[in-house]
Image: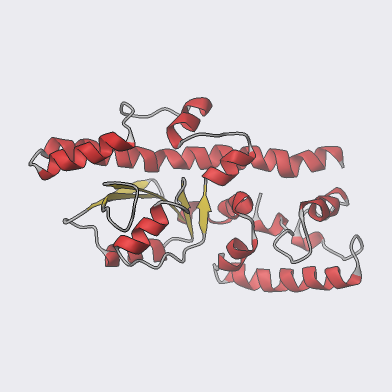
Amino acid sequence: MRIENSFIPVRGVGETTERRLWEHGITHWDDFDGSVVGDTLADRIEEFIADGRQHLDQGNLTPFAEALPASSRWRLYENVREETCFLDIETTGLDASCNDVTTVSLHRGGETKTFVKDRDLTSDRLTAELESASLLVTFNGQRFDVPFLETCYDVDVTTPHVDLMYPCKKVGLDGGLKAIEQDLGIEREMPDISGRDAVRLWHEYERGDEGALETLVEYNRADTKNMEPLMDRVATRLHEEVFESVQRTA
């Protein structure tokens, strides 16, 4: 499913109206003719489509991300799959006002980068990585990762953002990232480590144990890389449930 299949970013169009459009064969912006809705709403949709085409031509997903509910931002993914940055952080605690970010991993285009506190983790590096991405994907990052980075590194995260926790809930996948991975059969390359272990490993590294840092980095990278197959599966399932189901019954 692509942005061009979506009408719910339009003011006054909810999921019910969008579904009615799809049921009448209006499944893409190209198909819209205004016959299914009233004149006022038709004008709004036509204006949205015209503006939307310009935004897509410019590679600007921000207006769509701002207009879509958090649980529906997965619709942005297919348009910019190759330019999507998956991000995960490790910290020394849960409070950004008094704890530190220790490692940040970013996965994009098959490559994973990890930055480490007091080595190469800087505001400039983070900003450059995020600004070069068309879409940011995290798990619980809306409440955790992004506020931490903004507080600890004074980074202004403006990249359109999909927090995978919300679309996962939409398809009945609850719990943490690793629990959902197990439910879906997504394997990890290393044993499970908890957030508490991540804090312990960092402190062991501060006391001189380089091996502890290596383990922490591997853990952080695994979290980040595994978000890509999770995003693929959840987006596919939602596409089938939200979009293809209408076409089958139309």
Q: Residue at x 57, y 34 (%)?
A: 173
Location of residue 131 with respect to 181 vertically, above or below: below
Q: Which quadrant of the rendered structure holds the C terminus?
A: top right
Relative to 118, 236 lies left or right: right
Relative to 182, 35 lies left or right: right
Relative to 151, 33 lies left or right: right
Quarter where residue 205 is shown:
top left
Quarter where residue 64 is shown:
bottom right
Q: What is the x, y in percent for residue 157?
A: 42, 64
Colouring style: secondary structure
Q: Residue at x 52, y 28 (%)?
A: 184
Q: What is the x, y in percent for residue 221?
A: 32, 41
Q: What is the x, y in percent for residue 211?
A: 14, 35
Location of residue 14 with respect to 225 vertically, above or below: below
Counting the numbered discs, the total is 0
Q: Residue at x 63, y 51 (%)?
A: 72
Instruction: Pick out the residue farthest to the left.
Output: 208
Q: What is the x, y in percent for residue 113?
A: 30, 50
